[in-house]
Amino acid sequence: MSKSAGLVVAAAMVVAAVAVVALQKGDAGRPPPAPGSITSWAYQLQDYPGGRLDQLAKGPHQLVVIDLARDAHSDFFTAGEIAAVRRTGKRVLSYFEIGSIEDFRPEYPVLQKNAGDLIANEWPEWPGEFFVRYYDERWWNLVVRPRVDQALKAGFDGVYLDTPLAYEQLDLASAQGRDRAKLARDMAALIVRISDYAKARKAGFLIVPQNSPELRHQPGYTKAVDGIGMEELFYQATDQKCTADYCAENLAETRALRKAGKFVLSVDYASRPGLVSAACGRYQAEGFAGTVTVLDLDRTSPPCP
């Protein structure tokens, strides 16, 4: 064997040894971006092609938000599936609701049977979805903690928590004497509890509530969260510019959270190219990660240019 051939063989053996070690340790793939540096994200909660995450894994986004389950019920995404997406350099957050329950979720019949009094008024805009007494310990034990446990088990980077706005929408007749101020404190306390519970089990686990940025004024909230998801800061479903007073209020509160070091995942619902471009321009100007997509959240949209 020539000297050069021997060197080639030796080099190949080194490469093979490194590969074996990598496989033994579990190849982590490309490292994900720091949350604060993320500029693009995908938001899809249903109709995953073939029930798989391949399309999201191959996509150009830096972070993806998906449901805990491919069928929005009990066919949970596995640790292997989440790891495959993460190996492409993406962060993956699991979506679930903390202030309401949909009648197609697996916990709904359990609540009806064992804690029916937790289920309160129906959300008019979303038939079949009901606000709940989220401050009750049974809600934590029967729904929230098992969902966090499932997200941890599957290897998600964090959780994307919808319906904190329940503190504004829960019928006061069902709130057992609580007023809106107390309900706001209770919602912030639930988010803090989720954060403490999850981070104690996985350091760096991301806590990202959706909407209700004014909860930053409640004790413990800002420290507990890593970022916030914000719908319709600029365009409401669909192709309607957000001009109501609360639009400016939401933007001001979101800016304050960004200034406090929290990342922002902004999502607007528009289809007209000019509006999509305008929304993308706002994300860049504000320092937000953004996506412009469809209200059904049944597909991904191209990232902003």
Image (spheres, helix red, strand yellow):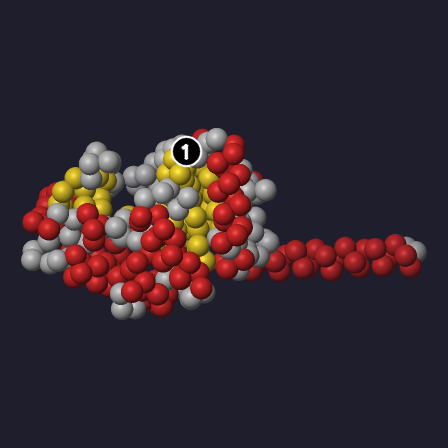
Quarter holding the N terminus is bottom right
Is residue 236 depicted above or below 10 in this figure?
above
Which quadrant of the structure image shows residue 223? Answer: bottom left
On the question of residue 198 being in view, the answer is yes
- In the image, 134: left or right of 37? left
- Residue under the point 85% across and 59% down: 7
- In the image, 36: left or right of 197? right
Q: Percent x, y for residue 79?
A: 43, 49
In this view, the residue farthest toward the right is 2
On the question of residue 297 being in view, the answer is no
Q: Percent x, y for residue 28?
A: 56, 56
Please tell me whether mark 1 sits on a helix, a strand or a loop.
Answer: loop
- In the image, 11: left or right of 54? right
Picture mark count:
1
In the image, 18 versus 133, the foreground residue is: 133
In the image, 133 versus 108, the foreground residue is: 133
How many residues crowd mark 1 within 10 Å: few (<14), some (14–19), many (20+)?
A: some
- Residue under the point 11% across and 58% down: 178
- Residue under the point 41% across and 44% down: 234
In the image, 240 versus 184, the foreground residue is: 240
Q: Percent x, y for residue 6?
A: 86, 58
- Residue under the point 22% across and 46% down: 100
Query: Which residue in the protein does label 1 denote?
Result: 239
The amino acid at mark 1 is Asp
Is residue 31 depicted above or below 114 in this figure?
below
Quarter holding the C terminus is top right
Q: Percent x, y for residue 217?
A: 29, 65
In the image, 2 versus 126, the foreground residue is: 126
